[in-house]
Image: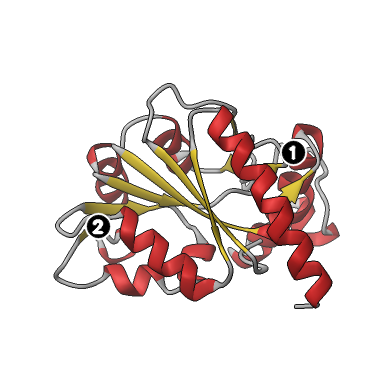
Amino acid sequence: MNENIYKRNELLAQKVIKGLESRNMSGYYAADKEEALKKALELIPEGSSVTMGGAMSAHEIGLVKALKCDKYNFIDRDAEQDKRVAMLKAYDADVFIASANAITEDGVMVNIDGNSNRVSAIAQGPKKVVFIVGMNKVCDDVDGAMKRARNVAAPINAQRFGLSTPCAKTGSCMNCKSPDTICCQFLITRYSRHEGRIHVILVNDNLGF
């Protein structure tokens, strides 16, 4: 990463963290993937039941691999025959791992979901939610964050899952009602009523989509 971009991200992260704190959420800055992994594991006590949505950022920093050991009760939905059962376990988990499709400079997060298990668990259920968010996902405001979620994250994920949506073919949101749409539920997280529940690790790297 260019040195000037890196420094800009470092400064911008502090602004985002202040925004998160004003919204009763905790923010942390990680200079790289290794530091992000270390901070995430500090937030997840050994013995915790842990699960996640489809957070590519968590895979990219090595968090998922680190959690798949006997120190944690990692609920791996991909290893379960009945994925619905695994998804339902998330609501009673100690820790839910997530990312954000976008986050604003003042700490508002935007997420779009197809099955809605991810956004529903972020909103309510797990005792703690730990977000891994690359600085590439920071936007000016909620409108910009929504546009990023719909026109960057959604088309890439639709392509990744091999879905037959207009955005998978055009690369941008067509506001479709396709049976394959992954834009079923929109979650804007602007405040946490429960102190100490939501933790956001901002990583000075390009992570996820």
Amino acid type of the residue tagged 2 in the rendering:
Ile
Q: Is residue 126 above or below residue 180?
A: above
Residue 50 screen position, x and y as percent: 27, 54
Q: For residue 81, which quarter of the picture?
A: bottom left
Q: Which mark is residue 64?
A: none
User: Quick one: label 2 or label 1, which is nearer the N terminus?
Assistant: 2
Q: Residue at x 16, y 67 (%)?
A: 71
Q: Residue at x 81, y 41 (%)?
A: 140
Circle 1 sits on which residue?
Answer: 146
Residue 172 versus residue 62 in the image, above or below:
above
Foreground residue, 4 or 48?
4
Q: Nearer the viewer, residue 133 or 93?
A: 133
Mark 2 and mark 1 residues within 8 Å of each other at the beta carbon: no
Q: Quadrant of the C terminus?
A: bottom right
Instruction: Say what amino acid the circle numbered 1 marks.
Output: Met
Q: CA distance from mark 2 to mark 1?
A: 30 Å
Q: Which residue is mark 2?
A: 75
Asked whether, in this view, residue 139 is left or right of residue 193, the answer is: right
Residue at the image position 57 percent from the left and 72 percent from the top: 32
Apparent side of residue 15 relative to residue 61 in the rendered image (left or right): right
